[in-house]
Amino acid sequence: MTNTVAIGIQWGDEGKGKIVDLLAPKMDVVARFQGGPNAGHTLVIGDKTTVLNHIPSGILHADTLSLIGNGTVVDPFRLVEEMDMLLAAAVPVSERLRISDRCQLILPYHRALDAAREAAKGKARIGTTGRGIGPCYEDKTARRGIRLVDLTCEDLDARLDENLRYVNFMLTEFLNSRPVSREEVTEALDLARERLLPLAADVTLILHRHIKAGDRILFEGAQGSMLDVDHGTYPFVTSSNTVAGAALAGLGVGPGHVDEVLGICKAYTTRVGAGPFPTELYNAEGMCDAENSGKHMAERGHEFGATTGRPRRTGWFDAVVVQHAVRINGVTGLAITKIDVLDGLAEVKLCVGYEKDGKHLESIPADCNALETCTPVYETLPGWSENTFGATSLDQLPDSARALLRRIEEVCECPVTMLSTGPDRDHIIHL
């Protein structure tokens, strides 16, 4: 049976939630392997919109088990809030969800540190979601993190006292911020004991039992490959590995258990927060190209973050970025979303390289400052006036749209296997 890793291959917000939701009915298990409540996967089914942050997108399917792996970080307040939202919609969460007992917990002091550090940077801020993701992963690496299983440990109080001494010293002495009280932390831990601990399990063991039974598994990533802490536009990245290889460490499976890697990307490019963006045309400050193409994408694509609500920066499809992501993830097929957003543009541009200091670059510079000053090299293709919204077969697309897809396949050296033409579950073309 086919086991698939589904990941974003731009700067996030590629439409992963919809694609995972489409694949989930064919899967026995959907397993999330990294990130935390900084993810925002939007599912649109009929007139119902559901935004998930922690919980895998397969949770809406009765016969699909949803797993949160050890590579994720979990905020008890936000996860319980998400569970309650699903319960209110008659989704039996306790039957369909299991959480790795090795998950790190995001506690109030992580959020306080995140917010205070970002505020202290002023104009140099990175643009984090402020949800404590980075400080939590930092504690994990420093071996002072609190995991879900640790709620049963006798030395928990002593470890928390030590953590609070450290964090409150940083907050008050260096960041000019208020300390975090023990009561705030206790509230989070009590909630986790009551609502999350009953769902705790050895997720790796569960996965291997399903693998042994020949069941189909979907490994679900969060954020996008260009936000990977090693391979993205560092330091404007998230605090975990977002590439396909992270599925192995974040769930405890071997490379032999992955059969295909589906790379999800938009027919154009977006980014939230700070960081280099070579093909950028439009942003919240009103930066815009002469033809207003970037504004067209932002408005037609409803480009606001599902988690943060922040307006996204928009620009042309960057094949250099996608080609880089195809390489580092071993992508076997592309799922392109939002091609309908390009409807009505007289021409469509495709970035096929960068120029810097008179030299042509075919790959992404490791130095963000160098990338910031790169000039994109564009190919210009004819646009189309026809409506592609809701198309369900390739022959419903205009010739120019099909030509764009063929050129993307050529430049990115990867076949397009899925095409999304709108937000609804039925707005899809399988190629």
Image (cartoon, grey):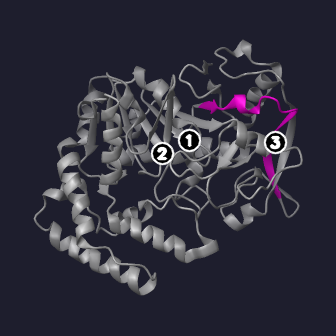
- On whether residue 406 falls in the magenta region, the answer is no
> Does the residue at mark 1 contact the one at mark 2 (Cβ under 8 Å)?
yes
Residue at x 49%, y 73% (from the top left corner): 117
Mark 3 highlights which residue? 293
Q: CA distance from mark 1 to mark 2?
A: 7 Å
Q: CA distance from mark 1 to mark 3?
A: 23 Å
> Between disc 1 and disc 3, whose residue precedes?
1
> Between disc 3 and disc 2, whose residue precedes?
2
Q: Which residues are magenta?
A: 334-355
Comparing 106 with 51, the one in front is: 51
Tell me the kind of residue under disc 3.
Ser
Secondary structure state at the residue bearing disc 2: strand
- On whether residue 354 falls in the magenta region, the answer is yes
How packed is label 3: few (under 14 Cα within 10 Å), some, or many (20 or more)? many
* Vertical relation: 180 (above or below) 82: below
Tag of residue 8 = 1
Q: Find residue 208 and report its horizontal and vertical position in percent.
A: 27, 34
Mark 2 highlights which residue? 222
Residue at x 41%, y 20% (from the top left corner): 26
Quadrant location of residue 385? Answer: top right
